[in-house]
Image (cartoon, rainbow, N blue to C red):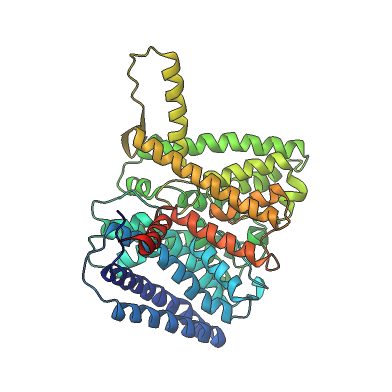
Amino acid sequence: MILRPQAKNFKTIGYYIGKILIGIGFAELIPFLVAIFLGEFEPALDFAIGASITLIFGFIFQIVFFTDRSIEKIEGLTITAISWLFAMFLAAIPLYLSGHWASYLDACFDSMSGLATTGLALVNDLDHLSISHNIWRHLLMFIGGQGIVIVALSFFTKGLSGAFSMYVGEARDEKILPNIIHTARFIWITSLIYFILGSSVLTLVGYFNGLSFFSSIFHGVCLFMAAFDTGGFTPQSQSIIFYHSWVFEVVTIFIMILGAVNFNLHYCLWYGRRREIFKDAETKTFLVSLGVLGLIVGLGLFSAHVYSDNLSFLRKGFYQLISAHTGTGYATLYAKQFISEWGDVALMGMILAMSIGGATCSTTGAIKLLRINVLFKTLVNEIKKAILPERAVIVQKIHHIKEIILNDKLVKASLLVILLYVTLYAVGALAGMILGYPFLNSLFESTSAAANVGLSCGITDPSMPNALKIVYIIQMWVGRLEFVSIFAILGVIIASLKGK
């Protein structure tokens, strides 16, 4: 029997959504202060309006739905999924008010793209967007990469018994520390320390590359936030091409990989357990998949006679592969070059790289390396069962922070998520084809949206159909949250309609 949700359940959901919205509202004050400092008074008004509306919603939710009861699992998951939608709509307000987005839907597309660390964009005339609006775009990625709920757990909650379900709802099911609040704070402390170090390095690179001191700071901060959180936004419309610097490319490759690493491994690195980085199943899977996919992309580019020398291959082919595999979306070539120059084989290699993504408990989206490792080990197990005597006992383990036995529960969970992602990629590709785009282009763009990558072959554009914009928004949302919290919303809706 399905139980209908009660008023107390909806109050709890509303109350904690209010907490998260207050966090988003305070975050909007950062670009507001930047705008005031730089004398960007019209953008400052945009953020004053946006922050005020967001904070008003947050405090109203807190007052109207006030409760002191603990969060149940289904409530925590629902809070996570709904808060992301609220955050998208409210974070889009200052973007839309800037006049650089043709419609509010386009602004919502970019705010979801930022929060989901995707990087696909519908902004017009990005090169003349105000500094404060650009800071907000990249700050959305920094918030979304760590997680909207992580913000609430880190800064607005002293203790919360149902916090783990909210944490899991943002596609993280691994605790770094026994206490989930401490885990959330560790993620933010780690990210802020990396932010200071990484932004400083990029600032120096930009300065010695010819940018003014202020511009180098601005670009360094923006590029780090998008690279570490595997997002892909840049302050300029040409992405990494704008800088014409191999040093920028090398530094951003390092930061992209850093962002795609499991936060558990960052913890091991900080506390002297450096061998874990090389022993971990995800690290090994990343190196193997990078080699295999690099071979596919390389053969594709070689057969298409695209790049005549090794340096061009590294700066174009290899850079794009790393960007795709880490789910970042930085590019050293123009979107339409994927279709006009690369050829089908290289494009399929890129699609596979985007579909896999980085590590679990990182800032990336997509299927994740651990699940690919589980799939491979399961295939090996089945082969062993076929060739060994029936009485043979096979115990397969994987090393992921610790030794984990490959049991049926883990295998089923991994295969289910892989199947759901493949379905999500296919649905988006089908939508693209229905709306008139070629198959491979549609699959590339759909995978990029659903896997939260941000590379584009030219489909994502302000002129594309609104229906496809909505499809990609849903893909970015579902792909970032990895289905569990989405199923929770569906469960609450079904229970509300059919429950007793």
Seen in the picture, residue 35 relative to 368 is either above or below; the reply is below
Toward the top, the furthest residue is: 389
- Left/right of residue 394 with respect to residue 373 in the rendered view: left
* Quadrant hosting residue 39: bottom right
- Left/right of residue 456 with respect to residue 492 in the rendered view: right
* Quadrant hosting residue 187: bottom left
> Residue 349 in the image: x percent, y percent?
63, 40
- The answer to whether residue 272 of the structure is visible from this angle is yes
Seen in the picture, residue 39 relative to 263 is either above or below; the reply is below
User: How many discs mark residues in the rendered view?
Assistant: 0
Query: Which of 257/105 is in front?
Result: 105
> Residue 495 in the image: x percent, y percent?
35, 60
Seen in the picture, residue 273 relative to 33 is either above or below; the reply is above
- The answer to whether residue 194 of the structure is visible from this angle is no
Q: Residue at x 37, y 45 (%)?
A: 265
* Quadrant hosting residue 400: top left
Q: Residue at x 57, y 47 (%)?
A: 354
Q: Residue at x 44, y 52 (%)?
A: 482
- Left/right of residue 175 with respect to residue 287 in the rendered view: left
> Which image quarter holds the C terminus?
bottom left
Query: Which of 321/215 is in front?
Result: 321
> Residue 156 in the image: x percent, y percent?
29, 70
Query: Which of 310/168 is in front?
Result: 168
Q: Residue at x 47, y 36 (%)?
A: 285
> Residue 450 in the image: x percent, y percent?
55, 53
